[in-house]
Image: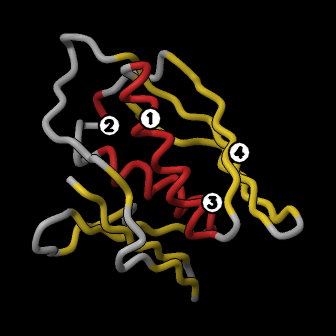
Amino acid sequence: MQRYRFLKHTADAKFQAFGRTLEEAFSNTAIAMVSLMWDWEKIEKREVIQVEVEGRDLKQLLVIFLEEAIYLLDTKNFLLSSAERVKIERRGRHYLLRALFKGDRYSDKYKIFGNVKAVTYNEMKIKSNDFFMIQVVVDI
């Protein structure tokens, strides 16, 4: 199964990410988003950052999760290489996500070639049949 694919969009970037589980699809969504900014496969896994986010529904949870990767780039120069051990659980009326972000701090050995400004709710989809598909549009 492919991790993600990009779709045509007039002004922003649009992609779909896939997974056998919701957690795997969330992880692949993060990888798809950062691939718009750097080659995630070339980033060494030298640092591990624990991520814990909460949302009132799965779409809000996804937006907050993806924006965490943007926030870590902006505040700590952290380049995400993988989102691992993603766990999503329902907590009453909210969802809680815990994950490990692995990657490295930006240095001259890495090249940043794009910029994701924000994650949008525009055209967002979270679907499941035999597998999970998540569609996202980001502002670049």
Q: Could you tell which of marks 3 and 4 lies nearer the N-terminus?
A: 3
User: Residue 71's mark?
Assistant: 1
Labelled pair 3, 1 in contact (Cβ < 8 Å)? no
User: Residue 40's mark?
Assistant: 2
Q: Could you tell which of marks 2 and 1 lies nearer the N-terminus?
A: 2
x%, y% of residue 2?
A: 37, 65
According to the picture, the residue beneath numbered tag 4 turns out to be: 98
Q: How far apart in space, not on screen, are marks 3 and 4 (Cα)?
A: 10 Å
Dot 2: what SS? helix
Question: 70 left or right of 15?
Answer: right
Disc 2 vs disc 1: which is toward the camera? 1
Disc 1 vs disc 4: which is toward the camera? 1
| Residue nearer the viewer, 41 or 30 | 30
Q: Amino acid at mark 3?
A: Glu
Q: How far apart in space, not on screen, are marks 3 and 2 (Cα)?
A: 19 Å
Q: Residues within 10 Å of mark 3 (few under 14, many from 20)?
A: many
Question: 13 left or right of 119?
Answer: left
Residue lying at 24% horizontally and 37% vertically, measured from the top left: 39
Question: 75 left or right of 22?
Answer: left
Residue 33 in view in this figure = yes
Q: Farthest residue toward the right?
A: 92
Quarter of the rendering containing residue 21: bottom right
According to the picture, the residue beneath numbered tag 3 turns out to be: 23
Q: Could you tell which of marks 1 and 4 lies nearer the N-terminus?
A: 1
Residue 1 in view in this figure = no
Q: Amino acid at mark 2?
A: Trp
Q: Could you tell which of marks 3 and 1 lies nearer the N-terminus?
A: 3
Q: Amino acid at mark 4?
A: Arg
